[in-house]
Amino acid sequence: MIRRRASVGDKIGHIFTFLGGAAIGAGLYHILDPQRGAARRAWVRDKMGRGLSSAGRFLDKRVRDLRNRAQGRVAELRASGEQVNDDILVERVRAQVGHVLSHPAGIDITAREGVVTVRGPILEGEREKIEHRLSETRGVREFHLEVETHPTAEGVPSLQGESRSQRRARGGK
C-alpha cells in the first residue's frame, strides 16, 4: 500500500476540523455547565425568542406592504380607462404639479373632459417637470402648457416670496 503525503490544503482542513470540534465542545461545556448553564440557556432562549418575534413583525410588515401595493395596482388598472370628474382632475393635477413647482400658488389649472390647461409664470427648468407629472397623472388625456418661463423670480409677483425648497431648508412645511 502506497501512502501519500498530506498536502498543505489537507493539513489546513484538518486544523479547521479540529478547531471547529473544539469550539463546539467549548460551547456545549459553556451551555451544559452545572453551575451557570441554566442561566446561560435561559439567556439564549430569551435572545432566540426575541429574534424570532422581531423577524415575525418584520415579515408581517412586508406582507402587508406587498398586499397593499398589489391592491393599489389593481385599483389603478381598473380605473385607468374611466372618465374623471373635471373638478377632481384639477385637484389631482394641482397636487402633482405642486410637488415640482417652487411657487405653485401662482399657477391656474383648468380641465375639461380630460384635457388639462396649465397657465401662469414658472421658473426655468420647471416646464419639463410639469410635463412629466401631467403625463403620469391618471385621468389626463391631453394637456396644454400656457406658461411663461422666467430665469429668476425678480419682477414676477407670483414668483415672489419664499419657495418651497427654501421653506423645507429652514425646517418649515
Image: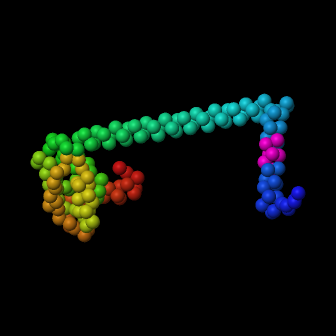
In the rendered image, the quadrant that contains the N terminus is bottom right
- Closer to the camera in the image, 166 or 61: 61
Q: Residue at x 23, y 44 (%)?
A: 80
Image quadrant assignment for residue 52:
top right
The residue at the far front in this view is: 1
Relative placement, left or right, of 62 versus 79 is right
Check the image and tell me how it is coloured: rainbow
Indicate the position of residue 173 as horizontal and vertical percent values. 35, 50
Does the rendering let one see residue 160? no
Q: Is residue 14 above or below residue 48?
A: below
**Number of marks present in the image shown:** 0
Does the rendering let one see residue 27? yes
Q: Residue at x 19, y 44 (%)?
A: 81
Image quadrant assignment for residue 119:
bottom left
- Closer to the camera in the image, 30 or 166: 30
Q: Residue at x 77, y 31 (%)?
A: 39
Relative placement, left or right, of 132 versus 68 is left
Indicate the position of residue 65 as horizontal and vertical percent values. 42, 39
Q: Residue at x 80, y 63 (%)?
A: 8
Indicate the position of residue 101 as horizontal and vertical percent values. 27, 57
- Closer to the camera in the image, 34 or 125: 34
Indicate the position of residue 88 as horizontal and vertical percent values. 19, 42
Relative placement, left or right, of 171 versus 97 is right
Residue 20: within the magenta? yes
Identify the magenta region: 19-25
Q: Is residue 30 above or below residue 100?
A: above
Residue 81: within the magenta? no
The residue at the far left in this view is: 112
